[in-house]
Amino acid sequence: MSDFLDVIEPGLFTTVQDRGRLGFMDIGVAPSGALDALSLRSANALVGNDHGEGALEMCRLGGRFRVATDSLRFAFAGAEGRLTLDDEPIAFWRSHVARRGQVIHLAAIRGNVAYMAVQGGFAIEPVLGSLSTYTRSAIGGFKGRRLHAEDRLPLNQPEANPGHDLALPHPVPAERGRALRVVLGPHQEMFTDAAIRTLLTTPYTVTRDADRIGVRLEGAALEHAGAKEIVSDANTTGCMQVPGNGQPIALMADRHSCGGYPKIATIITADMHRLGQAVPGTTLRFEAVAVEQAEAAAFMLAEAEAATFGRMRDV
Amino acid sequence: MRLRLAGDGMLVAEYSTGIDPAASARARALEAALKARAPAGIVASMPGIRSLAIIHDPVRLTTRALSKLLEKLDAGLTTASEAPSSRWILPVCYEQPHGLDLDECAGKLKITVDELIARHLAGRYTALMVGSYPGHPYLGGLDPSLYLPRRVPPRVRVPRGSVAMAELMTNVYPVEAPGGWNVLGCTAAILFDLRWESPSLLSAGDEITFRRVGLEEHDTLYAAFEAGTLHPREACR
């Protein structure tokens, strides 16, 4: 094995993430996976990979990488930032080919996460069926941790496939600025009516503590109707748990599988990629929808994504 | 059974709001029935202390369809529906430095340390849920006379293998982790190892008892489990 992507600067928190480590909730293993799964799939589609293949997730600050293989096709998607190949600006949402020795650099990211997919993917052994990194328990990804300078990421392919590069006609619409949609519950009766009203009418700000485990929010306190704790039960990504201080925490990919705080509402599947792009200081609003509306939104997003990927063009 | 919606991607079939071994057994039986049916669109399921959680793909399996199926399966459950379970005997060393909170707990309960250990050892426990951390079991069946709340504030670091109790449950920390349970001792047994074909030693529904070991045996077992010369699947039967 002599084909690598070499890490010169790792960025702030760069990890390998894929569609997630699904199906191990019953033994306490977090799903992990991309915070913005839509952008992960876009980056993979652009280089012809399976859409859920492992890619680099860079958080807030991109990295600097040297190509240590004959040629490498790669693509960036997600929140953008100044992206260069040997100091020449190049674009997101399309693939590029780099030659041996060339340097790919992404500077500060105007959003939370950007994804870099490489054609053929990384030659990393899956753990429990996934390449995703769960740093808290050192499971999966590259050595179970975020990337460091001088890491050498092994590549499956020594050179780019022949043929043209691809571009997406436009990113799948992210509907920025719109309220995040929630389905109330699973424990809405454990909160006062005023708390439910407050959640749906007042803004919440993403705090500095936001990470891959959870997005801590700050705003008007949500009052419990009685007990402030429950006998632990299951969590899922998007659940908004409310500890005793009344400040909600939206659970993300690296969450615990269960927890003892009541969950007032759950962000719908179709809006999770938007929450994944929320940076500290972002103001969020929440809107309640029926579960049937949430399912329709998930279906429409999948349709929009397939339509967008179907219109990729040669460049 | 009460169905609780956690968004469009998880449904929780809840049998109780309290710690209830019967509710936990019913949740495991429901999971076994669901797995036998294996509808398309199920991503993961987790039997819990008092409920069964099912993560599903909202595009392939709607909440309405899954709800209907769960109601039908629940109505057809019998006591024989539960999946088979395993029995484990975990070695525990209650000596110092492992029994971090023994003295304090005995003091609060107004019993001797020996009595506390005896009552903890007498328990026949059931894994009601495995979760929060990889391989971490919530064990039901604690003697109610040992009821103590969690520690406030929680410890930042509870050592790997710590056997602890809080409220009506006892547990084992598979890895060093923050936690508020009252630590009584330490097991040498490894509960989670990615090199095993099935990485978690324990599953929900397993029956667990503890066996007291001294410091010397604890250290010997610890070294053997660490080195891989002893496997808990054989050594903890």
Image: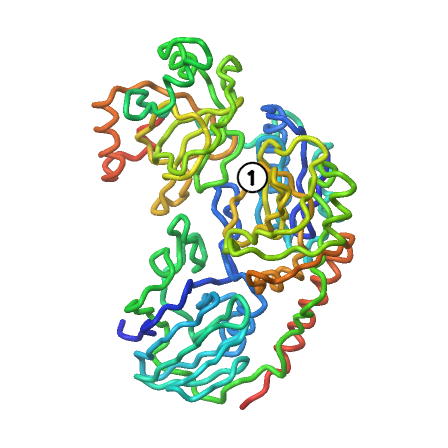
Q: Residue at x 70, y 39 (%)?
A: A223
Q: Position of residue A249 (x, y in %)?
A: 59, 48
Report which quarter residue A99 is drawn in: bottom left
Callout 1 amino acid:
Gly
Q: Quadrant of the C terminus of chain B?
A: top left
Foreground pick, A235 / A25? A235
Q: Is residue A216 left or right of residue B6?
A: left
Q: Is residue A99 placed above or below A306 in the rendered structure?
A: below
Q: Chain of mark 1?
A: A
Label 1 packing within 10 angstroms: few (<14), some (14-19), many (20+): some
Q: Is residue A15 at least partly visible in the picture?
A: no
Report which quarter residue A278 is drawn in: bottom right
Q: The residue tagged with tag 1: helix, strand or loop?
A: strand
How many marks do you count on the picture?
A: 1
Q: Is residue A150 placed above or below A252 in the rendered structure?
A: below
Q: Residue at x 35, y 76 (%)?
A: A65
